Amino acid sequence: MPIIIALMATLLMSALGAALVLTTSSDALIAANFRDAQQGVYAADAALERAMSDLATRADWNAILDGTASSAFVDGPPSGVRALADGSSLDLDHTLNMMNCRKITACSASNLSANTAQRPWGANNPVWRLFAYGPLSSLLPPHTLESAFYVIVMVADDASENDNDPLHDGQGATNPGSGVLALRAEARGPRGIRQVVELTVARRGVPGEDAAGLQVLSWRLRR
């Protein structure tokens, strides 16, 4: 009988020990995910700050909207697959197409102007362009910033435009989207972390001075 009681006590202590280890491991994983999620927001914001700095130096935003101009913060052509720090991959074309027409294959002209629940503006639907993209660690000089995040900033004409031309910034006092751009930053990180921040910005002051020449009209963290 004492042997049986001792075995039962040993089994009980083992079960309690295993439960404690599992709880501790789960708490550590939750804390790590929360930390990475917060870092993802900061990464997206940092990429937006860089993009705004580049936008402020350009007097003509039409070259950005039609895709012929981009930020200096790029890691190659605006297409193809990028290897992320955790071993996964990111297809820039798929990401852009999903924003423009909710599919990974190339968007047709009719896809871009289709009136849908996500894009209800028809001919004024934003046509998103890749503007800035690359590993966050390359945003500053080498060995200055250590980060596992890859960031993308997309730019488009503001959806409040009424000129039916998303590739050019509308003009005139009757166009509510004149001088306004929409920006979307995505930060991809370890364990599938993905954070998205969206901005709308407008010109303020003299173009070409610095980021202070832009005014943030809205900021939103997408959930």
Image: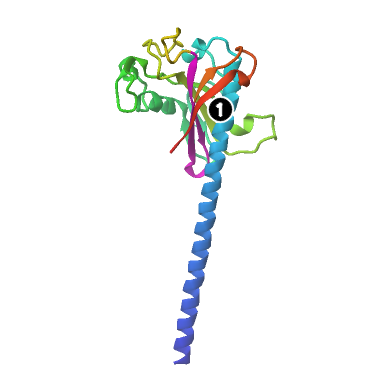
Circle 1 residue: 48
Q: Is residue 35 above or below residue 84?
A: below
Which part of the image, by quadrant, shows the C terminus?
top left
Q: Is residue 19 above or below residue 186?
A: below
* Number of numbered labels in the structure image: 1
Circle 1 residues within 10 Å: few <14, some 14–19, many ≥20: many
Percent from the top left, x then y, of residue 114?
Answer: 30, 20
Instruction: Name the side, left or right, on which 91 lies relative to 73.
Output: left
**Helix, strand or loop status at disc 1:** helix
Q: Is residue 149 above or below residue 104?
A: below
Percent from the top left, x then y, of residue 215?
Answer: 55, 21
Instruction: Name the side, left or right, on which 67 lies relative to 119.
Output: right
**For the magenta stretch, what is the residue range?**
179-199
Report the residue at 54% width, 44% height from top: 36
Q: Quadrant of residue 156?
A: top left
Which part of the image, by quadrant, shows the N terminus?
bottom left
Verify whether residue 193 appears in magenta: yes
Percent from the top left, x then y, of residue 140?
Answer: 66, 29
Instruction: Name the side, left or right, on which 104 lies relative to 56.
Output: left
Amino acid type, label 1: Leu
Q: Is residue 215 visible?
A: yes
